[in-house]
Every structure is written in C-alpha cells, then in structure tokens.
C-alpha cells in the first residue's frame, strides 16, 4: 500500500492550486454547464461560481497557498487547538405535509454531524486497519442557534412555505438567509433542480450563496430521510466542502474516471483515487497505479495499486465513516478565513446563543400561514393552514386569533379555518398566535383577490400603462389593479416595470428586464378581472411588443394565457419565441430599447369561443428570461372584432412578423372555414415587389412566408403587405432595415 504521509502536506497542498485549476478546466471543456449527474453538485456549482466571479477563485487559491506555506510548527499548533463550536441555522423550505420535516429530524441531523466530526460515530471500529492511524477527530461541534440575528429567542430552525422547494438551487437562499459570517446556513428542500442530493461552496464565496442546500431525503437518519448510510452522511460530506475539502479524487464531478488518478485532492494523507460512483467496493480497492497518472482497469484485483480510502466522507461510496488528519488540517485552517473566523469566535458564540452553558428560555412563536388559493371568484371558500414555528405546539395552551375582513366568518379561533368571501375585492388576512411564552402577529396585505363580475374592468378595454402609479392605478379599489409578480423570492423581486420613452401608444410602456434576470426567471403580469359580456361576439386580444435579439442563440420567451375561473386555472399558454417577438429584423444588439415607433409591432390573438360573454376573464403575460434583452409591452387591447378593419384583422388573427423583414417573415392569419388567400408586397407607391399566388386554405391558422423579399435586395424603408381573403383585402406595413 502507498499512502502519502502528512509531512508531505506542504508540498502537495502547494500543487493543489495547479491541480484544481486543471481539473476545473477539464470539467468546463468536457461537460456543459448544466451537467451534474452525481449526488453532490458542489464541483459543478463551484465552477459556475468561479466563472461568474473569478475573484472568488483567486481568493480560494490564496487560501490554499497560505496553508501550503505554513510551517510544521504552525500546522501542529492548528491541529492541537481545542474543539470549536459552529452555530447552525436550518431553513426548512416546504409545501406542507411531509416536506415540512419535524424538529426531531433536524435534531438528528445535528447529532450525526457532531458524531462524525468528533470521531464518536458508532462505526469507528469499522474503519480498516490501514487507515486507523490517519482517522482524525476534527474537533467541530455543531449547535443550533438559540439567538437569531436580532437577538431574539430561536430554536435554530426556520420554516418557509415556497414552491421553490420542488426545484431548489441558490434561489431558495433569497427566501431567507441569516448572516453567513455568523451562522452556517443549511437549506433543506424537497428537490434540487440539478438532480443533486446537495451542494456547498468552498470558502469563501459571496455572502449571497454561502451555505449548504440539501434534499430532505438525504438529511439525518429519521423522518423523510431514506435512512441509508449514504443519506445519513450526505450532510457530513457537504459540511466538508463548506470547510474547504474537495472530493478525494480532486476537483471534478466524474468519480470513477481513471484520469482522476493524475489529479488528486492535494491533501497529503488521502491516497490518489479515481473515486467511487456507487455502492461500497472492497476495502482492498486499488484503482490507481503507483507513480503513474493512469488508473487500473482491474481495481479490485490490482495488488500493486494504491489502496483507496473508500470509507472517506469526501468520496461517493456508501460506506463513508472517516476524515483523515490532513483533511482535519484543511478544515481547521479554513477557520482562519474571513468568512469563517467570525463564525467560531467567542463573541459570535455569545451572540448566537451557542456558547457553553447558555441557557435558552422557551421561545415565542413566529406566526406563519398559507391559503389554499389567493385568487378566487365571489362566493368561494378558502382554507388557511397554520405553519407557525419556533415553539412546540400544544392544543391546550396555544390560541389563534384570525382576522378576515370581507370574509365569513370575519374572525376565527380555529387552527386551520375555512372562510367564504361573498363579495369581490382585495382583502388582508391577519393571524395572531398566543402562547404562554409570547405572541406573534402576521398580516399579509391584499392576500386574497376575490374576483366579482363588477369588481374589475369591462371590455372593450385599452391599457397603455400611462398611469404613473401603475400597477397601483386604483388606490381605493385594488381589485381593479394589474398584478406584477415573479417566480423568484423576495418582497419585491425584479419583474415587469413601467418605463417612459418611445411608446407604441402614449409615452409609457412595460419592460421585462431579462438582461438583469437569470435564465428561467419569470416576470408575470396579470390583468384585473375583465367582464366580456358587453361584446356580443368572440373578443380579440391585441398587444404591441418591441424586442431585439441579443444573439441568435438566446431565446427569451413570452407566454400568454387566459382564465375564466378567477385565476384558479389557466389555459395552455400561447408561446412567442425570440424570433416571433423580434421587431428589429436581422439586427442583434445588447441592451435594446425602442427608439422609434417602428420598433413596435402588434400581435393579434383571436380568443376561443369558450371565452365569449365571460364575466370573469383574466389575461396573463409571462416573460421568461434567457438572460437576453428586455421584452417591451404596450397598448394591450380587448376588442370587439365586429368594429373597424383593425378589429376585423384582429378577429382573423392577421399579423406580419418578424417585422422588420427577415427571411422568416410571414403573413399570419386564421380562417374559420376554407377560403382563398393571396399576398402581395408593394412599395408605398403601390408598385409590386413580390406576390404569392392565391390558393385555397383550410380552416385554422396559417402563415405565408414572404419568400424572395428578405430585406437584402430591397431598399430600406416601409412597404405594404396586402392579404386578400376571399373578397376582402387587408393592408398592413412591414419595415425593411
């Protein structure tokens, strides 16, 4: 067996910088950014962070260099320092039910951490003889905080209701975060969007992302945990990353790759290994050849190979049960870093209630609740579910005082009451929770939107966003206001914004700021209730948009959907890609904003006959960012299609896009029955440029491309598109840049 001895720590840690950088480059080259594929996403997330923030990579390099430059005396002193206490806060992100894990499961996770980091775990004797001399007591103890950042009593467990728990990542950290310089933040979720079991960042990342995200099925050994050794020790693994440890095979997320034998983790007493992909191989597992960067093709039958430390917490084997002395050295050294040294200071332990001998008093509750819906029709009933935390519920001593203005009943002392709202309006809900140890009050303003047939707007409707108070157009009748939302956390996340400038109609319009939003962020705009009963036929939606592509590969999207049950359910969305939204032709640019009225083009949407006469109609615009350019929206109209030619064009769904002209530009229209259609393109003097011979088209939606007029052979200017349907001709403009 060949094991690197601890005296080589200085030399080998010195080369970790080069190895980590090289392995990072391999990951970038060989796998796309969204690649995770394994149970821990720390390597992948770390590389993404370093791309966004190169200074963080330089900072980590400085840390490694500093450890490598330590004298043997300094190393010995660090290894001999007394045990340290780490204040912890666990943020449970849930949607009720089993995802709202128990305090007992959290306590069990802390118990396992304390055993694993103090070498008191029950399976210490199972570490094979070859590694027993290297088996280290790290000397970390973890305690749930007893004082929150404001000095209030806490159990060290917070609970936040959010759908983000189903697709978690760094987004959940914006829901709730305690100062990462004072607390180890752990977010426990249902599912991580990448498919990983958990991830953490090496010290020191930005304060906005520092901490650990982990699935509740890989957290502790009871409750929702899967209960296997792998699940029980997943948090131990992630905490290792948090205190500076790479995976034992190095800085990639490709365990089992023989090339890892030439990388290593830079820690002296962890043997070179390729890493374990699953299960627990034989304790004679020897994947790497000595004095070579190659791996063995027969790792279970390689008597001359290097014995792997498969029982190490920083591998992926399911039999993890130890850290080495070299790993202890790195974790202890991480406590000297700016982002970790305040964490374990005596002053911080006092301020977080985690110092020895601190006596925590029973805490007052923190009121929290969720409603079964937030937008309903008149006469509907809602159930309000209590999610108050920070105390132990006792039916005999816990009192609830609910206030429901506009509801029936208007008050309740039940824990989870059901309330009916007979009249349209926008209503607050208040919960007061009273216990022997204190009380807490939570008011959620305008939480319930009750849509009545006369509580919103009536069609025909035009909204051009000219009111400078938009979306709060009606201070005394908030149910008539448009709502601006986001799928991102926070009280006021970035979403649709009213701006002034060159508008389609007036001087103001809305902007979805995709250039400032991460990929997948949704900017959501919902209309007030619109009563369509005054329109005798099927109405038409028309809106103007302005948009330029940032590049040919970036695809910002706009989705439009409708509801006739007060927003309880929505239709399948109409989706407009970046190509369909584009109003600047083949031009791509960064940071587009409209500078001419020609930058604006209409989109016409003939509505389904199912919406005709509806008294409870809502429209929703969702701009989905691909980190491209802003999408601009103006002049939203709900029209009677039996009015002007514009309305008739709207009824037939006639529009021309992309506009300005590109090779993809087409005339779009919808036919209720089969009809003959022909297209001509002329200049402003009526001279023919091109024409498409007429033919009969069946019922449904159609698009006739303006082939042969791709803008490259035409003089810049405005041209006319003439669409003849049967005996009617409709004319609209198209721009050539």
Image (cartoon, rainbow, N blue to C red):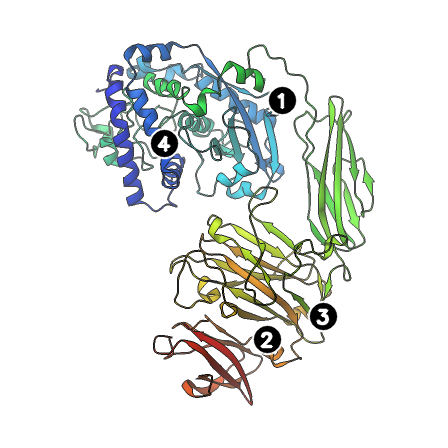
- Label 2 neighbour load within 10 Å: few <14, some 14-19, many 20+: many
Residue 151 tag number: 1
| Residue 505 in picture, x, y percent from top left | 60, 67
Q: Residue at x 59, y 27 (%)?
A: 157
* Distance between the alpha carbons at the discs numbered 3 and 4: 62 Å
Q: Nearer the viewer, residue 673 or 635?
A: 635
N-terminal of the pair, mark 2 or mark 1, is 1
Judge depth for marks 2 and 1 and give the one in front.
1
N-terminal of the pair, mark 2 or mark 3, is 3
Judge depth for marks 2 and 3 and give the one in front.
2
Circle 2/circle 4 CB separation < 8 Å: no
Which residue is labeled 4 in the image? 279
Judge depth for marks 2 and 4 and give the one in front.
2
- SS category of the residue bearing label 2: helix
Residue 613 tag number: 3
N-terminal of the pair, mark 2 or mark 4, is 4
- SS category of the residue bearing label 3: loop
N-terminal of the pair, mark 3 or mark 4, is 4
Q: Is residue 647 left or right of residue 658?
A: right
**Is 270 located above or below residue 712 in the figure?**
above
* Distance between the alpha carbons at the discs numbered 2 and 1: 61 Å
Q: Nearer the viewer, residue 1 or 502?
A: 502
Q: Is residue 211 visible?
A: yes
* Distance between the alpha carbons at the discs numbered 3 and 1: 57 Å
**Is 667 located above or below residue 261 in the figure?**
below
- Label 1 neighbour load within 10 Å: few <14, some 14-19, many 20+: few
Judge depth for marks 3 and 1 and give the one in front.
1
* Distance between the alpha carbons at the discs numbered 2 and 3: 18 Å
- SS category of the residue bearing label 4: loop
Which residue is labeled 2 in the image? 650
Circle 3/circle 1 CB separation < 8 Å: no
């Amino acid at each position: 067996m060949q094991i690197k001895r601890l005296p080589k720590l200085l030399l080998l840690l010195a080369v970790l910088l080069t190895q980590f950088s090289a392995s990072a480059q391999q990951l970038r080259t060989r796998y796309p950014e969204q690649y995770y594929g394994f149970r821990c996403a720390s390597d992948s997330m770390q590389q993404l962070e370093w791309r966004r923030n190169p200074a963080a990579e330089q900072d980590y390099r400085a840390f490694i260099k500093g450890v490598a430059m330590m004298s043997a005396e300094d190393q010995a002193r660090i290894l001999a320092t007394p045990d340290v206490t780490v204040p912890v806060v666990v943020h449970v992100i849930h949607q009720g039910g089993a995802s709202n894990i128990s305090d007992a499961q959290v306590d069990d996770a802390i118990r396992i951490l304390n055993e694993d980091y103090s070498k008191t775990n029950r399976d210490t004797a199972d570490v094979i003889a070859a590694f027993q001399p290297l088996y280290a007591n790290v000397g970390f103890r973890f305690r749930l905080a007893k004082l929150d950042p404001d000095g209030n009593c806490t159990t060290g467990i917070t609970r936040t209701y959010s759908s983000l728990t189903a697709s978690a990542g760094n987004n959940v950290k914006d829901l709730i975060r305690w100062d990462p310089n004072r607390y180890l933040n752990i977010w426990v979720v249902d599912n991580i969007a990448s498919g990983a079991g958990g991830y953490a960042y090496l010290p020191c990342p930005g304060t906005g992302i520092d901490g650990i995200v982990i699935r509740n099925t890989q957290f502790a050994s009871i409750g929702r945990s899967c209960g296997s050794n792998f699940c029980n020790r997943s948090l131990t693994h992630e905490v290792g990353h948090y205190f500076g440890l790479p995976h034992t095979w190095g800085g990639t997320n490709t365990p089992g790759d023989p090339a890892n034998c030439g990388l290593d983790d830079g820690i002296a007493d962890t043997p070179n290994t390729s890493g374990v992909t699953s299960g627990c191989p034989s304790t004679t597992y020897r994947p790497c050849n000595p004095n070579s960067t190659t791996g063995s093709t027969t790792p279970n039958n390689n008597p001359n190979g290097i014995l792997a430390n498969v029982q190490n917490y920083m591998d992926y084997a399911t039999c993890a049960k130890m850290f080495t002395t070299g790993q202890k050295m790195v974790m202890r050294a991480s406590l000297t870093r700016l982002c970790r040294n305040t964490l374990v200071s005596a002053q911080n332990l006092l301020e977080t209630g985690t110092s020895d001998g601190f006596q925590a008093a029973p805490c007052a509750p923190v009121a929290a609740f969720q409603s079964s819906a937030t937008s309903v029709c008149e006469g509907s009933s809602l159930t309000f579910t209590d999610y108050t935390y920070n105390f132990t519920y006792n039916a005999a001593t816990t009192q609830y005082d609910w206030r429901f203005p506009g509801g029936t009943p208007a008050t309740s002392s039940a824990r989870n009451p059901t309330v009916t709202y007979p009249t349209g309006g926008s209503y607050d809900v208040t919960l007061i929770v009273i216990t022997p140890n204190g009380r807490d009050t939570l008011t959620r303003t305008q939480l319930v939107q009750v849509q009545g047939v006369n509580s919103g707007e009536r069609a025909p409707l035009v909204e051009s966003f000219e009111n400078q108070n938009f979306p709060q157009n009606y201070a005394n009748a908030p149910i008539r206001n448009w709502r601006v939302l986001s799928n991102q956390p926070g009280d006021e996340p970035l979403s649709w914004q009213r701006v002034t400038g060159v508008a389609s109609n007036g001087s103001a319009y809305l902007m979805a700021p995709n250039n400032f939003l991460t990929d997948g962020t949704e900017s959501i705009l919902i209309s007030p209730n619109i009563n369509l009963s005054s329109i005798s036929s099927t109405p038409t939606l028309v809106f103007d948009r302005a948009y330029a592509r940032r590049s040919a590969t970036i695809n910002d999207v706009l989705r439009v959907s409708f509801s006739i049950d007060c927003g309880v359910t929505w239709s399948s969305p109409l989706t407009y890609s970046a190509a369909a939204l584009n109003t600047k032709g083949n031009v791509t640019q960064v940071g587009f904003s409209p500078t001419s009225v020609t930058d604006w083009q209409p989109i016409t949407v003939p509505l389904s006959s199912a919406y005709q006469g509806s008294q409870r109609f809502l429209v929703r615009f969702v701009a989905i960012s691909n980190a491209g350019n802003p999408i601009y929206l103006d002049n939203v109209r709900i029209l009677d299609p039996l009015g002007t030619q514009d309305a008739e064009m709207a009824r037939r769904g006639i529009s021309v896009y992309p506009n300005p002209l590109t090779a993809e530009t087409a005339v779009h229209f919808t036919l209720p029955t089969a009809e003959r259609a022909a297209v001509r393109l002329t200049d402003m003097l009526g001279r023919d440029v091109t024409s498409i011979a007429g033919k009969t088209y069946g019922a449904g939606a159609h698009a006739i491309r303006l082939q042969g007029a791709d803008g490259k052979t035409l003089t810049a200017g405005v041209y006319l598109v003439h669409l003849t349907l049967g005996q009617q001709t409709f004319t609209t403009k198209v721009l050539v840049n």
